[in-house]
Each structure stands twice: as structure tokens, then as C-alpha cells.
Amino acid sequence: MGAEEKAHHAVCPGKKHNLEEIREKLASEDGPRYWRSLEELAGDPAFQEQVKREFPRGASEWLEGFSRRGFLQLMGASLALAGLTSCTKQPLEPIVPYVKQPEEMVPGRPLFFATAMEMGGHARPLLVESHMGRPTKVEGNPDHPASLGGSDIFSQASVLELYDPDRSPAVAYQGEIRSYAAFLGAMQSQLAAQRLAQGAGLRFLTRTVVSPTLGDQLKTALQVFPKAKWHQYEAANRDNARAGAMMAFGEPLETQYRLAEADVILSLDADFLYPTFPGAVRYARDWASRRRPESSRAMSRLYVAETTYTATGGKADHRLPLRQMELEQFARAVAQGVGVNAAGATAKGMAGTWLPALVKDLQQHKGNCVVIPGEYQPPVMHALAHAMNAALGNVGRTVFYTEAVAANPVDQNQSVSELVEDMKAGQVQVLVILGGNPVYDTPAELGFGLIMKEKVPLRVHHGLYQDETAQFCQWHINAAHYLEAWGDTRAYDGTATIVQPLIAPLYNGKTDTEVLAIFTGQGETKAYDIVRAYWQRQLQKQAPATPAARGKGKAAPPPAVDFEGFWRPAVHDGFISGTAFQPRQAQLKSIDFGPGPQGSPPALEINFRPDPSVFDGRFSNNAWLQELPKPVNKLTWDNGLLVGVETARQMGLKVNDVVELKIGNRTQQAAVWVQAGQPANVVTGFLGYGRRFAGRTGTGFGFDLYRIRTMKEPWSTAVEMRKTGDTYLLASTQGQQSMDTQLGTRDLVISATASEYGKDPGIILRHHETPAKDETLYYNYEYKSYAWGMSIDLSACVGCNACILACQSENNIAVVGKDQVNKGRHMHWIRVDTYYEGDRDNPKAYFQPVPCMQCENAPCEYVCPVGATVHSSEGLNDMVYNRCVGTRYCSNNCPYKVRRFNFMLWQDWNTPQFKMMRNPEVSVRSRGVMEKCTYCVQRITQARIDSEREDRKVREADLLTACQQACPADAIVFGDLNNAENRVSKLKSTARNYGLLADLNTRPRTTYLAAINNPNPELPAPAEQN
Amino acid sequence: MEQKDRVEEISVRHGRPPVMAPGYTFATITDKISSIVLTRPVSLGWLMGVGFASLWAFILLFAVSYLFYQGVGIWGVNIPIGWGFAIVSFVWWVGIGHAGTLISAILLLLRQSWRNSINRFAEAMTLFAVACAGMFPILHLGRPWLAYWLFPYPNTMNVWPQFRSPLVWDVFAVSTYFTVSALFWYQGLIPDLATLRDRAVNRYARTIYGFLAMGWRGSARHWKRYHTAYLLLAGLATPLVLSVHTVVSFDFTIAVVPGWHSTIFPPFFVAGAIYSGFAMVLILAIPIRHFYGLEDFVTIRHLENSGMIMLATGLIVAYGYIMEPFMAWLGGNKYDLYQFWDRAHGPYWWVFLSLITMNVVIPQLLWIPKMRRKPGWLFLISLDVLIGMWIERFVIVVISLHRDFLTSSWGMYYPTRWDWFTLLGTVGFFFMCMLLFLRVLPMISIFELRELLPEAEVKVES
């Protein structure tokens, strides 16, 4: 044994190496040039293994089933690799901050940038809060007509999407990381071949393209490759609305409503107050403005005939649950009533009772009523609505037609079917999928994934996640999130918006315009240049659109030359003023409505709807949306199959029962949720669940109904249902949805009809006995400076949940997961309680947002043994997290149960992305600590500091709570009660104002304005309808 | 067996059984009791008992370790039911302790001589029960390592507890109770420790007992001062019997929760505490007198008296059960009314039904004198009462919380395995302590038993 070998043995006893072999390896060319130890040289498998393991365990074998905890450990170890927390980068190109722009960024003070988020074929205009270059909070753009400051759950949750650690971090080829340059290189040869064939084998598949730039680029690409084709597909597409417009007008016009002008609204299955509906944020504002009895204008009346219980249905003065066929017959009957010649009209039962009163109401409000068809109703329903609106003289008053918002509206179901046909025929050599997840969200009957994999030689996927489609494609290009990307888009009214990034792409993601630039001959161009070039061309082409006038009254800047003068205000304001589409004079064709539904309806039918939270599945990995209680039924994390009470009884089904659904020869299981107000013999299934490659948050929850959905009848079809005997636990955040107890009803939501309230406003307070102010053993606080208070209008609240997510984002509220939701441990500081009233087959729903009441006589305060919850001089029940020891006594004693407890460590303290995401103004709570709504005390403090610097009091406009700011319906008003001039003080002095459980002498600072309904006196009251 | 028969015979003859069987002298009493500690060999049964109890104590340790590692989320508590097994068990254990103090202090002041043979282990029971109870308020905290914040200790932040909170009162009540109980128990032990010191053969035992006996020589002066101090401590302990559970009941009455907010709670809780405490005394006394042959000292008289106290306090508790819904009805508060309706008809109806059965119906058997005199039956009834009183606290804590004001926030409580491990673990810990106590200290007060002999009667000349 040589000395060398002996020395080695001293280090690694028990290891023997053949010195000769090592020398040989060193000498030969095969051996590694740089070796780290003798083991490596010897090619010792154990050492090779160790080299692999030098990097955190699991890094080399990323598996879908990786646990969250495991991931956290990994991410903790990989901090240096990620390198994200230390240096955030703003995009290189100049972006323009919004209001109160300082000369330089003031550390600790946020900046606001206008941008927009695109979803489902239209954009949501936004104002995004940025802390030191990190976007942390999304608000609606108050200057934009489509928002007016309100926002919705999807845009609120998009912050989490940006920082989602599961987002695709790199360009990949066959699952292995590649550079973008490698992709460009690989595409060169392909493009050369395609150029020869004029692009005959080239196909683009996009979602609905709204971006003018992208639309323009695609057209250019089709000029470069004349035989290439561009297909569009979204699962929740607007084909029916388009086809309906084609039927009625011969062109794909967009319909817009002016609900502020509507006295009578008839919704035919349209959930127009919920943000999956285009323009819902604005519609909610307009609708709510007509639901306040204090307003000088008369209250509007809302009739909803629908096939499943929606948030809009809950707000209806009269709601009519019908099956699809009955709904169409009913619509035809109404159409006949208002003078539209449509055959096949039938209205039986309750619909029959409705019909004369409804028709009369519509007739009496000619020009001031509106009929809104549901997005998922067949084209003929849209055509009927167009005809009815025309017959009622609403067009030009409450209904407007404009050109389509989408760049190139097509029949998407047909478009994707054609693509599949082409793929089957082997005509597709290169398929570029820009956004979208067709392998998952096309109906299984198409067989998109397998056909694509077998028949298309080169498949490119561009997306935020390595999703199901990415698994089937060789190339995956990681997309830039909209908060990282330059772009443009249009709101529902056509207003063009420049999308500006707030942060440089976290993972060097590419925008769709950048990927497409390869095909338009632009090569590797930055999105910024692409978008600017497009608008520069537009400006030159037409008379320039006036940018949102900074200097009002000044002459418009000279055309063409002053592009910066156009660009800067446009980016700053978040929209290009004057680009809203002008109303079009639409000529109604003579429409053939056909004979109407014939025969008898199927024994059981199913409605497919995009999920209210995860939409078509694109938000599956967004834990905020997953844990958001869906409107009305308050389910989280799953898509329960909604079955009516009577139908469930007949079929012997209970909540959590698993059934097998069968359409054609395809079957799929689903878990039953018994839903009050669901029409008989109709089940509703929500799309977007059962994801297989969503990421760690979204994979595996719920049931994939795309497997049984068909192209022919995508929204409603006959189904066979069979009980399997299995159960699947669904997690709802609200166990009891009735105010009734066996010993009488509790006055939690107080409601009255408009006529009752008009006759006797005292009717509201008659429900309550509020103790006198001196009825307490403790002294009464005096509030000398401010007395913060909140008023929530139950008439206006549309139950859209925007407040919940706004609060979650503002206050760094943790997500707990389905198991913990089931145990009653969800953490939302504001919740929207939903109560049914009346008949279980068609109850009225009331939405009641419940934040902390900030009681003046707070039951939580005096029971805390350590003084962790204390009364502030401004009347807040302050929560001192550092002092809390976690007895939970305060929560027990809180009559409103608004306190939330960290039963375990819910917060993710390690993932670097989440560190960037959080609001730096709000403490991140750890395990064992109680937390609750603070009225956004950080915002109050900021406003107070600002006002003190200017030696004045806080003004009403200085300060909005997160829930208030997000509320599209303007139902939440917050302010100083010591100032009688404030809106909140005035609202609290109305006769509609009442305190929840005020009889307990808690003296809540948050009070409610009673829900006022406006039923048609000619119809039986909702509760007595059946 | 012979002795037992004799006791039975006497009891029949005199109507009431004696406090102690006849035929004992100072020496025989001392011999009999001290031999258990000093000379009796360790039996297999005792070893198995200690082993089994320790096993559960270790499970407790395991459950608590996991609890500290994960947080209270491992339990079934949630929003709205913020308090679960921990607080239920806390109240239960504190209550059990009360019988010991009642026997040692109140019955001493009332000159109930029969207490002399059971007070020692009843006091030990108090001490161990309060130790078990004391664990729970700390374990149930979200951040148990900060439990000391409930004490008013001087600190640089100048932050004090929030004195309006009943939980702070609890801290004082329970810690005072533990201190006084421990002092009282220890003082009572001193003359007996001296006896053990004098009789111990083992050097180590002699040293330890000698150290603990604090130089007791049994002089007349010692005895005089001893009795004065003992009476004083008894006087101190007496109000505690009433105050501790009153304060514990404030945890509930002070709150606005329907089902908690009730003025009947203080006396109701005290009665319930004594009820369950005597049940525990019987559960301990009956096997002890059987296995250690102490039927002469712990006679049927003791069992019968305990049974009678159980019957009396049980009736007070039953009265409370009647008054609660009656007051809710009289007051007309809809939340209170619903609370009592829900107890009987809600999802926990079966819990309420077992409560009434176990705490009200079954204990009525104690009206029958024969039942009171049959140790087997008494043991079963005591077990029933003990479980029943635990259920009562479950009803108060959990059922009240699960449906309060807003119907939207109603919930359900399901205990997890960790809840059970912790509860049963404290039971194991309790019995482990008790069994160890039996072997290292005289379980019956030797000197006080000797005072019962006619020889101890001293004629006081007035």
C-alpha cells in the first residue's frame, strides 16, 4: 500500500480505490478535466449521487407531488440561487408612476402605476401599488370608465400569481432548461422550412386576443406565412354572444348596458354583477347606484330568470329558477309579450305568474328597461334579447352596440375543432400555443392533447405555468406575467389601455408579443418596442387620439411628431382617452328565431359554468382564489356539483356524495353540493378543477368536467347521473345559511321592501332594541380626535367577494388549505355571510359583508388577560400581535366571530417570492396569535401622518380601507364619525342604518344599511311565491 | 375478611358504622400505616399500576411535545369553538381538587372527626389534581412560552396584565389554591414524617424523612403551636373552597356568550366541584382500603358520608340544570333560549342526554342506604359522576360556543387524537403521582387517626 493510498484511507476509511485506474483516467481524455476528488475520478456511483445531492434534495427530480413544506425547505436552501429578495429590478424602459409622483422614489412610500389585466376577452383597468419596485397590491383605476376605482377578485389575486413560486421559471425543451437563444436558434430552421411552404404547416393557437398590438402582429405573421392559420380558443368563450349578434345584426357586435339608466332589468341567466361577466365591475357600480332609497331617482327592479343560483340571482327582486328549455320558452313568451314575433312561447307555473306582470313592467318602462342575456345562453337567446331591447326602445338608452372588443372575434369552438381536424390530417408541422391550456380545457372528446402529441412534429407552448399543455409540448417558453410585461389591451367598452410592467420579469419570462415577433420577422425584439411601434404607427395612420388631457383646455398636441406626448399620459393614466368604441347604429335584421325548443326536456340536465373563483382553471394555482368562498354557497377549494334540494331528495343524494356523470359514452365523477334555489332536475358543474399539472396549490382538487363537456352543447346538455356510494369532502366556510333557528328568526340582515320603507322608515329600527349609552359598568370612552366608522349598504352589496381578496392582499392574510377550512380555521378578516330567506326551492339570498365591528363597548377587550387587544383613542379595537399569547378568549367572546386565530404556522416565512409580495406596512403574523380586521390601520396612520404634516385633519378622500376601495358597488363607506359632513356620518344618520346585534350593547362602529328590495307589487312576495 | 365482617356487624348493630374499627391502640395504628411505607414489599400490582399510569404520563409528554412543535392546531379547537378539551379538563381537574380541601379544612373546622382517616390522601389528590389542572391553561395558549405574561411581574416595558380579565383572576385563584393546598398538606405531614423518621431502618429514608420533618420532636409546645397553625391554615383554605371555583366560573359568566353569561354559575360550579371531588375521593378510597387492608380506618361510615355529600351536591347541580333554562325562559333572551333548546335538540343532544343521565338520574341511587354502603356500587356511581361532571364542562364550554349569535358562524367541534392523549395523559399522570404517594408517604394521617382513640381524649378543666 503506497503512502498516497494510506493517506487517502485515513480520510475515507473503508474506501478502496484502484490507483492505477485513477491514473489511467487522469491520463485519458475521457476523464473529467477538473475533478473534485478521487471518488469522482473513479466514477464512483455513490459520489456521483452525492454530487447530485449537493444541490438541495429534490432539485434534480422535481415532482409534481412535492409537498408545500418540502418545497419551503428547498426554497430556504436555495435562497442564494433565487437571489430575488436582495435586488429587485425595475424594467429598463421608462414607466410612468401615477398620482403624486415624487421626484425620486421615497423609501417607505408606495408608488402607483396604472396598468391592466386581461381575462376572458376584455381587460380590467388597474392601479397597482408598488413598494420599492415590488408590486404588492392591485386596485381598480379610478379614472377608467370600466372601473371607477372598483376591482374584482381576479385582479386582486393576480399579485399572488405574479409571485407564485410554481410559475414556470425557465425556457424548457423536453423538460430540460434551455436558454431563450436556444429556442430562437431551434426555430430558425423550422421557420426557414415554413417560409418555403408559405407557412402551410404553421398554426397559432391563442386565447381571445384583445391586445391591438398582438392582433396586429398575428395579422402580420399571417402575411409573412400566408398559408398559416390563427386559431383562438378559450373554454369560457363568448361564442354564443357573438353568434347571437351575428343572428341579429349580421356582424359580431358587442353589447353594452347603461344600468344607471335602467328602471327595470330582466336578466335571462346573466350573472352580470359577478366579475366573470364583461364589464361587471362597472355594471355593479351603476346597478347599485339605483338601489338606494335615499337617492333622488327611483329604485330599479331586477328580475332574474336563471338556471343556477348566481350572485346576481341573489340580488334579484324576483328570481325565477328555470331549466334551460323552460328558460328559452319563457324568454320567447316575454319576447312575444313585448312585441317580438317568436314562436315556441310557453310559461307555466311560476313563470306563468310572472309573465303578465313582467311584460307589463317592461312595457311601462319602455326605453328605461333592459334585457340582458347570459353569456352561456344559446345564440338565439342573445338574438331574442337584442330583439326585445329593440322592441322596448332601449337601444341607444340603456343598451348600446359597439364593434367587438376582441381583435378578431371568431367562433372559437369551431376554430379549435378545425385545428384538431388539421392536426389529425397531418397538416400541422409547427403549433405555437400562446397562452391557454388547450390540453386541459378543451373537451376531452376532441382528444386535443394526444392528437397534438402524435401528429404535430413541433409544439411550442408559451405560458405562465408548466401546465398540462406544456407537458405535451417540446418547447415551453415561460411567459411574463402582466405585471412584468409591456403590452396593450382593451376594456369591455373598447378603451385601449397600455399595460406597463411594475417589475422586471422575475424569471426572464417573455411576452406573447415577444414570442410572436420571431414569426413576424422582428426577431428578438422587446415588448416595449413592439407596443410602442404599434401605437406609433396608429398615431401616424389616424388622427391621433387625444391622450388623457393633462392640460385640459389646451390644444391637442401636434400629431405624429409628439409621440412622447401621447405615450406618457397614456401610460400614466392607464388608458388612451377617447378610444372607447363609439355606439353603433345597429340595424336589426329580421331574425328567424326558429320554432323554439321542442319535445320534453331531458330527465336530468347539466349546466357547465366557469368556476366563480378559478374561472376556466387558469387560476387553479392561486391559493387566494382557491380559498375564497364562492358566492352563495361558500365552497372553497373544490367544484361541488350543485343539485337542487328536491332533486337531491328524489335521488337520495346528500352533500359530499360522489356521483358519476355520463354524457354520451364519457363519464366523470363529481361531488354533490345540495344547493337551495337550484331548479329541479338541473345540476350545475363548474369547470376549472381536477387539474393534473397546476402546481402544488391547485393540482388534484375537485373534478375535471372538461372530460364530459361537448363541443356541440358546451353549456347545457342532458346528463345521466348515478350515485357511486363514495364520498368526497367539500369545504364550505359557512355551515348555516339561514337566519332562522328553531326558536324564531334572528334579525341579522334586516330587509324591507321599498314601499314599506317609503311609508314608514322606522320599520328598520323596530327590529332592534339598542341599550342606552350609560348602561355599562365601565366608563365610556371619549373620542376627541377621530372616530372611525364604517357603513355597509346591504342593498348595494352584490356578493362579489372583491373585498375579501382586497383585504387578504392588503393585510398579508395567510391561506390555510382545505383541511383547515373544513375545521373552521380560514383566516379572512372580512367575510361575506350569505343567508337564504324563504322557500328552499327558490330562496332569496342576502349578502352581508362582516368585517370587525370595532365595538365601542367591545366584548373582546376586557377578557384579554394580557391587554393584547386594546381600545384606541380613535375607537379601534387594536390588536397587538406581539403581546398576544393566544388564549382565544377574545374570539369566544366576540359575538360577530370576526377574529381569526393562527392555530398553526400558516404564514410562509421562507419562500422569497412571498416576502416580496407582502405589504411592508402590515406585520406578518406568526403561530399562536389572534388577528382581525383593523380598518386598515396602516392606511389610517399614513393618512394621519400626511395630514399632520400639512397641519390639517384627515379628509375623507385621503383614506379608503382596502375593502372599500375594491368594492365595485360602492357599498362600503368609511370615514370619521366626528365629522358630520362625511359620507359615512350621513349614511349612519339615515333610517336604514342599524347595528348588527346592537342589542348586546356592543355599540358597533361598523353598521349596516338595511337591504331594501323593490318587488313588483303585482307579483307575490319572494317568500310566498311557492 | 374477618375484620370486614366485624365492621359490617357493628354497623348493623349501631345503625351507623363507626369511624374506626375497635381494638386499635396508638402503637397498632402507627404500625399499620407506617408499615405500608417502610416495610411492605413492592407488589406486582402496584408496579403494574404505576407502569400503566406512567405510560399515559409519557403519552402526555409526547402529546405536549408535539403540541409545542406544531401549535394548538393539532387539537380540535377552531373558530367559533376557541376552547375545547383543554379548558373542559382544566375546570374538571380544578373541581376535583376541591373535595380534598373541603375535607381537610372545612370538615376540620366543623370538627367532623371522620375526616381524619381520609384527609391525607384527599389532600394529595387535591395537589395532584390542581397540578393536572394547572397544565391546561398553559398548554392551550397559542404561544405557551409566553404564559408568564399573565403574571404581574415588573418589567422594563411597564406592561401589566389586563386585570379586568377573568383569566388573570384565574391565575391568582389557582396559584393561591395550589400554594395553600401544598402548605396545608405539608404541614399535616410533619408529625407523621417525624414518625417515619423514627421508624425508618434505611439510612437514606431516615435522612430524607428527617429532613422533611423539620426537627419535629412532638413536644407539647410543638403540638400547641402546630394546632394553632393548622387551624389558621384551615381557616385560610376554607374560603378557597368557595372562591377558586367561583373565579373559574367567572371565566364563563363574565363573557357574553349565551350559556355562559349566567349568575348562577358560581354556586353551581362550587357544588359541581365538590360533587366530582367526592367522586374522585371514593374512586381512590375504595381500592386503597381494599388493597392495603385499611377497611378498619376507612370504614363504611366514610364511604356513606361521602356518598351523602355527593347526593347533596349532586342535587344542587341538578337544581342548577333546572334553573338555567328556567332563567333563560324567564329572561326571554332569544339567544339564551336557543342555547338551551340546542343543548337538548342540537347536534350534541346525545352529550346532553348523557349529562342528565349520568349526573342527575343515576346518582339518585344514593338515596338508598344500601347503595351507599356497598363499596362496589359506590365506586361505579362515583365513576359515573366523574365522567358526568367532565361532560358537564364539555356542555358548558363547547356546546355554548358552537352556536352563539350569528347563525353564519355556527360550527362543530371534533376532538382529535391529541385532545384525547392530553386528557388521558393527565389522568395517567394523576394516578402515577397518587401511586407513588401511597408508597412514600403515609396515606392516612397517623397522628390524627390516633386522636380518634379514646386514649387521646384529654379532659379539659374549665
Image: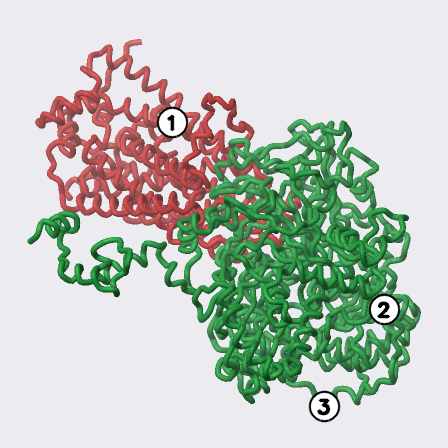
Chain colours: A green, B red
- Report the Cα–Cα distance between label 2 and label 1: 88 Å
Label 1 marks a residue whose chain is B
Residue matched to label 1: B106
- The residue mark sitting in front, 2 or 1, is 2
- Residue occupying image coordinates x 42% and y 55%: A71
- Where disc 2 sits, the SS reads strand
A437 on left or right of B359: right
Looking at the picture, does residue A893 appear above or below residue A245?
Answer: above
| Disc 3: CA contacts within 10 A as few (<14), some (14-19) or many (>=20) | few
Q: Is residue A1009 visible?
A: yes
Residue matched to label 2: A400
Name the one closer to the observer, A59 or B436. A59
In the rendered structure, are the residues bearing label 2 and label 3 in contact, judged by CB atoms less than 8 Å apart? Answer: no
- Where disc 1 sits, the SS reads helix
- Report the Cα–Cα distance between label 1 and label 3: 88 Å
Q: Position of residue A697 (x, y in %)?
A: 50, 60
- Residue occupying image coordinates x 61% and y 64%: A514
For the residue marked with disc 1, what is the amino acid?
Ile
Q: Position of residue A285 (x, y in %)?
A: 78, 56
Give residue A944's quadrant in the image: top right
Residue matched to label 3: A599
Label 3 marks a residue whose chain is A
